[in-house]
Amino acid sequence: MADLDLRPLSLGEILDRTFSIYRKNFLLFVGITAIPQLLVLALRLAQTLFFFPVGQRNVPGEQLQGRPGFGGLVALGIVGVIVGVVVYLVAYLFAQGGTVFAVSELYLGRTTTIGAALGRMRGQLGSLFGVLMLNGLVAGLAFLLLIIPGIYVACRLITCVPAALLEDLGPRSSLERSWGLTKDYAGRAFVINLLYFVLAYAAAFLFTLPFGVAIALSAKNPEALRLWTAISHLGEFVGEVLVSPILTIATAVFYYDLRVRKEAFDLQFMMNPTGPIAPGTPGVAKTFS
């Protein structure tokens, strides 16, 4: 409990605390993200080896379609895409949830491990998948109206994942909870999202774009094409592992800051530090200048 510091934070302090938590627990968060993502990397590398075998040469589409077994290859490719999507979703859910649980423990002055954080996701995958799907649907419908309303809705729903996991809420309840918590604070959520996208594009520029150029230049050399495609997947993996925890950490810190501001969570936690992280009780909110 020595590092416990529950108080209302400015936007700068939220970002500073985000990077401080990440820096001090770098291996923890990289491990939480990397272990599930290793499954995605392994699948992508296997697909690269399958679709770009050694000795393959460019074959016109008409000749390829006429070869025996072409229909089976197409079906296998479709199955591979479906398996890839499922594996990516499972890895993403584990990484997201594990990071939220780890931030919660650290923010409340406790300790945790990679195994403990990921282990808490058992039984939570279905619920978190529903939260993310409903969140994406609502934000997507808002974007269909106009860009600005879509961005605003996405900012208001930014804390739905911490709310769902830490308060054990269902998809609809977690979105409603986030909408209530972020009232009057959508601007802060926008800055958090903007910072993440800047870092994500920077990581893509550093770890993916150079290899994409190499792939384009190797279109007529199957061996080089396979090599650069595999390296591109490795670069994408590194960028994902390094950058994606930042948004999740910031979101969890923002969630706790809103609860401290609006629900006197710091007082509730001081009275029952080992109790569950229950939703705020009406009438217990604090007012801060």
Image: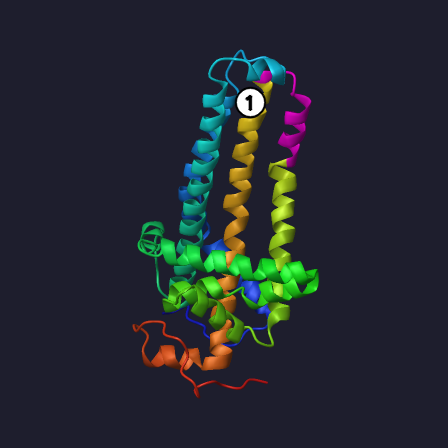
Which x, y percent locates residue 6?
A: 45, 74
Residue furthest to the bottom in view is 283
When the figure is inspected, residue 278 is found, relative to residue 69, above or below; the finding is below
Q: Is residue 257 above or below residue 35?
A: below
Whole-percent x, y for residue 265 in the image: 42, 78
Q: In which quarter of the image is the N terminus?
A: bottom left
Q: Residue at x 46, y 17 (%)?
A: 69
- Residue appearing at x 55%, y 22% in the figure: 226
Q: Mark 1 = which residue?
A: 227
The range drawn in magenta is 209-222
Quadrant of the drawing holding the C terminus: bottom right
Choose between 130 and 285: the one closer to the eye. Answer: 130
Residue 142 is inside the magenta segment: no
Query: Toward the viewer: 58 or 79?
Result: 79
Magenta region, main secondary structure: helix
> How far across and how far down the image is residue 171, in percent?
43, 64
Query: For the point 50% across and 17% down, which residue is it?
Result: 53
Looking at the picture, tell me which residue is in the foreground, 289 or 72.
72
Residue 241: in sight, yes or no? yes
Residue 20 seen in the figure = no
- The residue under label 1 is which amino acid type? Leu
